[in-house]
Amino acid sequence: MPPGKSVGAPGGHRTRITRFHTTTSGSIFWNQALPMSVLDNAARVLRVLAQHGGEVSVTDVVAHLGLPKSSSSRLLKQMLESGLLERDAATLKYRPALLLLEVAHQARGSTPLIRRLEQALEALVAETGHTGYISVLDESRRDVVVLRAFHGSHPLRVVTQPGYRLPAYASSTGRALLARLDGDTARRAHPATFAPRARVLPHAPPDAAALAAQLDDVRVRGWAWALDESLAGVGSVSATVNDPQSGEILAFCLSFPASLNQPGFIDALAHRLVGHVAAIGRAAGDAFWQAMAPVPAGTAPADAVHH
């Protein structure tokens, strides 16, 4: 069949084959001219997502793209089925799926900052045997999304993988990230502010005021800790670095079996972690770490051992 010939397609549609390609093995494949209107509209949906907090409804697409409601609904459903979007079961709004998040962060993965974070975390995992994570807040600023995972030799009851989400208020990673936000924005991450009847996880801050108090402590010492909160049987310490190129804040975390905790354990582990994070942050131009001297050992809160 010569290039450029129109052929029949299911449903009576016709597709134009634009070019043949031959691989080194001799296999032949071709590119098909896709309906550009579909690609254009999908790209426009992604732009709306980027500009409006990372979530859109059918109504939002109608308003911003000028498409009929039926066409907007069909477009979002196609993007959902293609793995580009996921849908919040409670709000019925659409947001970027893991595929898009992974592509975006792999693109950023070529920057020196995230490479330094990965190298430092790999070294800490090898030294301590604990599991390491690099994570970010999602668009809602209520959940943490894992980007990278480095598994240690100490077995954990729960091991999270890239794409896994945790409530920000009930994890050390989340509180380290929330501490970088202004007070009102950070307080809104607590479920008491948006879902008063929601169950608050055991050992987590019981209300927004308690969360705010913990975040104040994190801002002073530069790191956060958690035990038996969003992940039962797991403890963790976390700190953050601000990427001066993208403005994104990345969390750097070590997780360990809660059974290993004893007086001084969290303090010592946090001191090691902060030594790496502070050096990376200062080198990257992160104003937080440039203004803060490395945190000495002995600064863990008195109740760092959970009973």
Image (cartoon, rainbow, N blue to C red):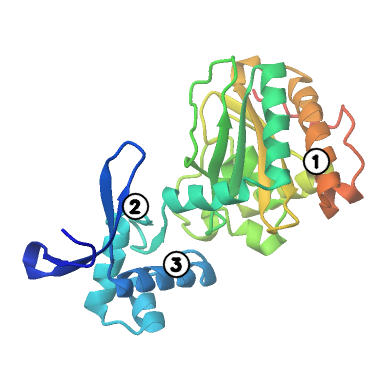
At horizontal 78% and vertical 38% (from top left) the residue drawn is 277
- Say above or below: 233 vs 83: above
Secondary structure beneath label 3: helix
Residue identified by numbered label 2: 83
On the question of residue 111 being in view, the answer is yes
- Say above or below: 221 vs 124: below
Image quadrant in which the C terminus is located? top right
Q: Which amino acid type corresponds to the residue marked 2 in the rendered image?
A: Gly
Secondary structure beneath label 2: loop
Bin the neighbour count of mark 3 within 10 Å (Cα to Cα): few under 14, some 14-19, many 20 and up.
many
Q: Which mark is residue 35?
A: none
Q: Which amino acid type corresponds to the residue marked 1 in the rendered image?
A: Ile
At horizontal 52% and vertical 31% (from top left) the residue drawn is 231
Image quadrant in which the N terminus is located? bottom left
State the CA–CA distance, disc 1 to disc 3: 32 Å
Q: Position of residue 178 (x, y in %)?
A: 66, 52
Left or right side of 50 for 32: left
State the CA–CA distance, disc 2 to disc 1: 35 Å
Q: Which amino acid type corresponds to the residue marked 3 in the rendered image?
A: Leu
Residue identified by numbered label 3: 46
